[in-house]
Image (cartoon, helix red, strand yellow):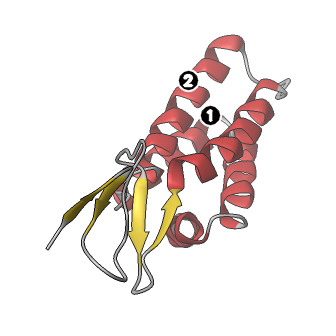
Amino acid sequence: MASKKKNGVSAGDGSVVIGGNVDRSNIVVGDNNVVSNQVAQIAPLFKVIFEAVESQPNLTPSEKEDVKAELQEVQTALEEPQPDETFIARRLRNIKRMAPEIVEVAVATLTNPVGGVAEVIKRIAAKMAEDANAK
């Protein structure tokens, strides 16, 4: 039975105590109930990717804005508990048409540090490679 604690709610011994500011980006993972903040993990990675866009001399200012808008949509999708791979793949294909080097930077940046996101990105990258080979 849940009981009220001074700084949160507890469901009994061995349970998770929730208190403070908890938003939709906190995710409970596995049997050990490890809580991670996926948004906090992804945001710095996209900062690196956005900086790479800005440093591209071959993109016009309007192209940079278009690429950044697509990247923002990818970031928002990856912050969801169950990212929509099809949606993300479409966004990355759009970016690849405008700035293929940015897709390479994005895939390389996202596949290393964040395990769950890395898996989604790896699957999308493999699908994009298959599509490219099919042409």
Task: Kindly indicate the quadrant of the structure image that contains residue 126.
Answer: bottom right
Outermost bottom residue: 31
**Circles 2 and 1: CB atoms closer than 8 Å:** yes
Q: How crowded is mark 2: few (under 14 residues within 10 Å), some or many (20 or more)?
A: some
Tag 1 secondary structure: helix
- x 55%, y 23%: residue: 66
Side of 107 relative to 135 (left or right): right
For marks 2 and 1 on the same chain, the one whose residue lies earlier in the sequence? 2
Q: Position of residue 52 (x, y in %)?
A: 79, 35
Outermost top residue: 61
- x 37%, y 44%: residue: 23
Q: Which residue carries the number 1 mark?
A: 98
Tag 2 secondary structure: helix
Q: How crowded is mark 1: few (under 14 residues within 10 Å), some or many (20 or more)?
A: some
Q: Position of residue 81 (x, y in %)?
A: 36, 59
Residue 133 visible in the shown view: no
Q: Where is residue 131 in the image (x, y as percent from the top left)?
A: 50, 66
Q: In this view, does 73 lie above or below 62?
A: below
Residue 98 visible in the shown view: yes
Amino acid type, residue under disc 1 in the picture: Met
Residue placed most toward the observer, 115 or 108: 115
Q: In this view, does 109 lie above or below 127?
A: above
Q: Which residue carries the number 2 mark?
A: 66
Q: Position of residue 11 (x, y in %)?
A: 24, 71
- x 63%, y 64%: residue: 114
Amino acid type, residue under disc 2 in the picture: Asp
